[in-house]
Image (cartoon, grey):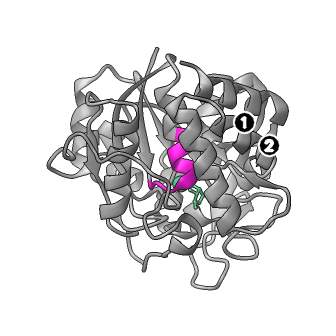
Amino acid sequence: TRKVIIDTDPGIDDAVAILLALKSAEFDVIGITTVAGNIGIATTTRNTGRILALEGRVDVPVIAGAAGPLSRKGFDTADIHGNDGLGGVAFPDALSQPVAGDAVTWLRDTLRAAETGSIDILALGPLTNIARLVTEYPEAAGRIGRVIAMGGAVHEPGNIGPRAEFNIAADPEAAEIVFGAGLDMTLIPLDVTRKVRATRDDTAMLQASDVPAAVASGALIDAYFQSTTGGESRPLHDPCVMLLALDEELFGCETLKLAVDTGTTRDAGALTVSEDGAAVSVALKVESAAVLKLLYARLKAE
Ligand code: BDR
Ligand code: CA
């Protein structure tokens, strides 16, 4: 098993990704840090506790992180993820309170207490917490094994601006800091996540299961069908992070030098391949059928 910390803003697809991680014995989820993104920090933190409660997990600490981006105003995407951030899908109440204190100091202390390189970070939201760790405690950040993050659009259009993707656009300065930090970093952009799509048949199949994680995931993706347009299927962005960690062979990565647009136009957060950019390993290919099969099998496993 591999020790992982999930940094997240649940969020419909974040919830599916967290459930996948909890259902995968390859991961020892040692904590979940939250960030404002899809919805405010109080709700992303509460939702994380609710998702853990569905799996009866009382052993995974939840630690609240940044309430907004490093230096700009936050987004509100309640129209996509519902007023509760989870599309109105029923979850139990959290079984325990979040750990007192801030995600960044918890990350610092946890990384310092562990062997260097032994903990990976699976990042599903804006990169604010990780950027603060890099800036405030670089030696602790240097102890991270690898970071796998969902974010950005490289050769594809964006989903919040013409070329900007939500997680990067929500905090472009944070992304620029994290990309430039010299971490072992893999980015999974929309180029890949848009190819990993659930159909209505898939949500029906998940909901027909009697396994809570599968039923909840089916309901979450159904809620996503209702709140977004896009034809017969919907992209499963954040689960791709866990799926790449589980089986890297199902993805094709390339090292690119990426510059982040930190301006103030509608395309703030857009990524450009540039000699001035920071070298990041970027997933550009995916075996869609195989990753979906892995995802659904894990969600449905008893
Ligand atoms: C990303 O933005 C969020 O809305 C999703 O949870 C995902 O992390 C996709 O652009
Ligand atoms: Ca997310």
Residue 264 vs residue 87, the one in the foreground: 87
- SS type, badge 2: helix
For this orientation, the residue located farthest to the bottom is: 265
Q: Residue at x 40, y 55 (%)?
A: 131
Magenta residues (range)? 9-17
Is the CB of mark 2 within 8 Å of ligand 1? no
What crowding class fits label 2: few (fewer than 14 Cα within 10 Å), some (14-19), or many (20 or more)? Answer: few
Disc 2 and disc 1 in contact, CB within 8 angstroms? yes
Number of numbered discs present? 2
Question: Can you tell me which quadrant of the image ligand 1 is in?
Answer: bottom right
Q: What residue type is labelled 2?
A: Asp
Front-most of residues 202 and 147:
202
The residue that disc 2 covers is 201
Position of residue 188 measured from the top left corner of the image (x, y, whole percent): 67, 46
Q: Mark 1 points at which residue?
A: 205
What amino acid type should be assigned to the residue bearing mark 1?
Met
Q: Answer whether residue 12 is magenta in the image.
A: yes
**Any mark on residue 185, and which?**
none
